[in-house]
Image (cartoon, helix red, strand yellow):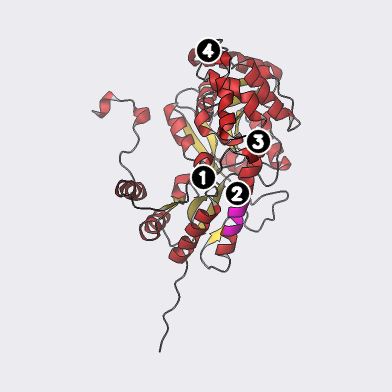
Amino acid sequence: MSDRFSRRTDWPAGSNRISELTDRFRRDGTAYIDLTASNPTVCGLGYGEDLGSDGADWLSALADPANLTYTPDPKGLLRAREAVSAYYAEKGVRVGPDRIILTSGTSEAYNLVLRLLTGPGQSVLTPAPSYPLIDLLLDLNDIRQQRYQLNCDDTHTEPDGNGWSFKSANARSVRQPQTPALIAIHANNPTGHTFSPSERAALTEFVRMEKMALIVDEVFLDYSERPRETFASEENVLTFTLSGISKVLGLPQMKLSWIIVSGPEAERREALRRLEIMADVFLSVNAAVQNALPVWMKRAPAVRDRILERVRANRQALDAALRGIPGLNALPCAGAWTAILRLPDDVDDETAAHDLLETARVLTHPGYLFDFPTGSHLVLSLLPSPDVFAEGVGRLVRTLGPKPSPSHK
């Protein structure tokens, strides 16, 4: 039977112990605390008046009469692209609508750019740690990956750093011949790493010297504790900057993202010409969401502030809960919506996550999913409501922390 199907989808069958236990709890109605929840729409971040409108008003933007007229544009409707341009103008970066391609989700944006830049069997450079979705996207495009490591600096000695850093030497050491692109994630999930000005200079110089293109995933850029400049302004190397409303507006279900093409003019124009043809094949972006975008994007600052407030509060609660607990340490993380706990090296992270779910009813991600180079880790979302998060972290500490020595009479 396996010969009938493409090898690109020949992923391992089955599930791990954690997903099997989670499925059983759901079937049985067993309650547990989900510290992996990362969807703003189910984490008590309601779209009420404090976010600029009530929920009905958000939905009313979808009732535009223009939705009844089909006026496709391969790049996306002009009014929607102008709304994206205005978003970058607020960041001090001029991005003309002609340099924007709208897509149905960041995964589609990745897919278009990867198909543009690579051929079957070629490889791209990808960061580690990072989110495992990239692995599947590369498999579906018959692309191999070479992982370059981000360095973790627990002592915060890196100038202008945030606990993690990019080193050109790490990328150079794994690059294979005929590697056409490097993927950078700014801010990285789960580490929160963002590129400082000096790191950005090193990255773009490396890409330029190696004659590669740069793909920058910026979906979490608005959620960095140390604001960084977008790569949409990059003109020295051919650059594809990806983002979308799943994080900018906290609306993953609305499925609208974008690609911004920048860099040397000749390469930029040719890339846009080809991307426009590719996008025209699918015309995938929903018209109603495109027409609503100009209204919605005006509320992006309020959404960002609300989510940042939640993330900061939960991070402070986590740090307080771990204070003085030997063997459990939170790694530096100054961006995105996640926290990383380092466990003792002799603890298997999948076993720890399974036991935590089984005994304390707390769901976390084992670190191996994110390709940490060494050590044992758990990854938590910082989006759950504060009371739920505090209870989950309390159970985690009681379960995984050191046990008190028995008293002797």
Question: Which SS class for mark 2?
Answer: helix
Which mark's residue is nearer the viewer, 3 or 1?
Answer: 3
Which residue is labeled 4 in the image?
Answer: 68
Question: Which SS class for mark 4?
Answer: helix
Q: Could you tell me how far apart the alpha carbons at marks 4 and 1 are, in whole angstroms?
A: 33 Å
Which residue is labeled 3 in the image?
Answer: 52
How many numbered marks does the figure carry? 4
Vertical relation: 299 (above or below) 313: above
Give the magenta part as a residue range.
310-317
> Farthest residue toward the right?
92
The residue carrying pointer 4 sits among few (fewer than 14), some (14 to 19) or many (20 or more) residues within 10 Å by Cα, namely few
Q: Could you tell me how far apart the alpha carbons at marks 2 and 1 are, in whole angstroms?
A: 10 Å
Residue 253 is inside the magenta segment = no
Q: Amino acid at mark 4?
A: Leu
The residue carrying pointer 3 sits among few (fewer than 14), some (14 to 19) or many (20 or more) residues within 10 Å by Cα, namely some
The residue carrying pointer 1 sits among few (fewer than 14), some (14 to 19) or many (20 or more) residues within 10 Å by Cα, namely some
Q: Quadrant of residue 2?
A: top left
* For marks 2 and 1 on the same chain, the one whose residue lies earlier in the sequence: 1
Which mark's residue is nearer the viewer, 2 or 4?
Answer: 4
Q: Give residue 403's position: percent from left, percent from top.
A: 44, 72
Which mark's residue is nearer the viewer, 4 or 1?
Answer: 4
Q: Amino acid at mark 3?
A: Gly
Vertical relation: 7 (above or below) 393: above
Q: Amino acid at mark 1?
A: Cys
